[in-house]
Amino acid sequence: MEHMQIASDNYVAFTFFIGTMAMMAASVFFFFELSNTSPQWRTSILVSGLITFKMQLCIIITCAATTWKTAHRQLSSGTLTGCLLYL
């Protein structure tokens, strides 16, 4: 399997990576803090965690459905469509 690195001048790929990792971190935070939240806010925290987790899962599945070479070509040309479909 060929490993590809993000080019140092490719800001779209870098910000997309940071955004998707932040979304996963938010999901983990919501689920871990669920038991520390007052009962009146637990439903809201649970729904927030489920939504961010579902969106992250859709992004991972959509990106995995395309090959990394195709995704890299789309990122390089600025026509990234598959990975941004669910954002």
Image (cartoon, helix red, strand yellow):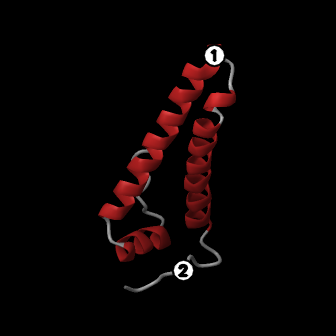
Q: Give whichever of discs 2 and 1 has the lower sequence position.
A: 2
Residue extending furthest front? 35
Q: Alpha-carbon neighbours of circle 1 within 10 Å: few (<14), some, or many (≥20)?
A: few
Residue 61: image location, x then y, percent: 35, 55
Residue 37 lies left or right of residue 57; in this view the side is right
Q: Which amino acid lies under the numbered mark 2 shown in the image of this protein?
A: Gln
Q: Nearer the viewer, residue 2 or 69?
A: 2
Q: Position of residue 1 (x, y in %)?
A: 37, 85
Q: Which residue is mark 1?
A: 39
Query: Whole-percent x and y of residue 34?
Result: 61, 30
Q: Amino acid at mark 1?
A: Pro
Q: Is residue 47 left or right of residue 54?
A: right
On the question of residue 57 being in view, the answer is yes
- In the depicted structure, whether residue 36 falls above or below residue 16: above
Q: Classify mark 2: helix, strand or loop.
A: loop
The residue positioned 42% from the left and 49% from the top of the image is: 57
- At a point 55% along the width and 31% down the height, the residue shown is 48
Q: Secondary structure at mark 1?
A: helix
Q: Could you give the CA–CA distance between mark 2 and mark 1, rounded to whole angstroms?
A: 45 Å
To which quarter of the image does residue 86 belong? top left
Please identify, in this view, whether the residue under mark 2 or under mark 1 is nearer the observer: 1
Q: Crowding at label 2, few (<14), some or many (≥20) Cα neighbours within 10 Å?
A: few
Which residue does the numbered mark 2 point to in the structure image?
Answer: 5
